[in-house]
């Protein structure tokens, strides 16, 4: 259930970070990163929202 951000696709819009700051953060290069050591299950709804709202479909869930 761990999400993954494809940095090649990410345009750094920040939507995922706003929607689910528990799981996503802005990293170097202005691209989104998945925070490790998070209970992804608990944040499932937020992750789903981020997946749906990413304008370039850069977020996938394993
Ligand atoms: S919503 Fe998508 S494009 Fe925007 S920062 Fe997150 S991963 Fe990148």
Image: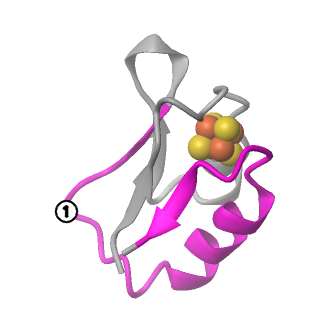
Give the crowd class for mark 1: few <14, some 14-19, many >=20 residues within 10 Å: few
- Residue in front for this viewpoint, 33 or 59: 59
Q: Residue at x 79, y 58 (%)?
A: 53
53 left or right, relative to 46: right
Image quadrant assignment for residue 11: top right
44 left or right, relative to 11: left
Image quadrant assignment for residue 3: bottom left
Q: Residue at x 51, y 26 (%)?
A: 31
Quadrant assignment for the C terminus: bottom left
Q: Position of residue 32 (x, y in %)?
A: 50, 36
What colour-coding does the image apply? Answer: one colour
- Which residue is at the far left? 37
How many marks overall? Answer: 1
Quadrant assignment for the N terminus: bottom left
Q: Is residue 9 above or below residue 54?
A: above
Residue 34 is covered by the magenta coloring: yes
Q: Position of residue 37 (x, y in %)?
A: 19, 62
Q: Residue at x 59, y 59 (%)?
A: 20
The answer to whether the residue bearing label 1 lies less than 8 angstroms from the nearest atom of ligand 1 is: no
Magenta range is 32-61
At numbered mark 1, what does the secondary structure look like: helix, strand or loop? Answer: loop
Q: Position of residue 56 (x, y in %)?
A: 73, 44
- Which residue is at the far top? 29
Kindly identify which residue carries mark 1.
Answer: 37
Q: Quadrant of ligand 1?
A: top right
Q: Is residue 31 above or below residue 48?
A: above
35 left or right, relative to 42: left
- Which residue is at the far front? 8
Q: Residue at x 59, y 48 (%)?
A: 58
Residue 40 is covered by the magenta coloring: yes
């Amino acid at each position: 259930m761990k999400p993954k951000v494809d940095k090649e696709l990410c345009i750094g819009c920040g939507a995922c970070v706003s929607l689910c700051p528990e799981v996503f953060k802005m990293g170097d290069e202005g691209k989104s990163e998945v925070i490790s050591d998070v209970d992804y299950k608990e944040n499932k709804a937020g992750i789903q929202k981020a997946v749906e709202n990413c304008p370039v479909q850069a977020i996938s869930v394993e």
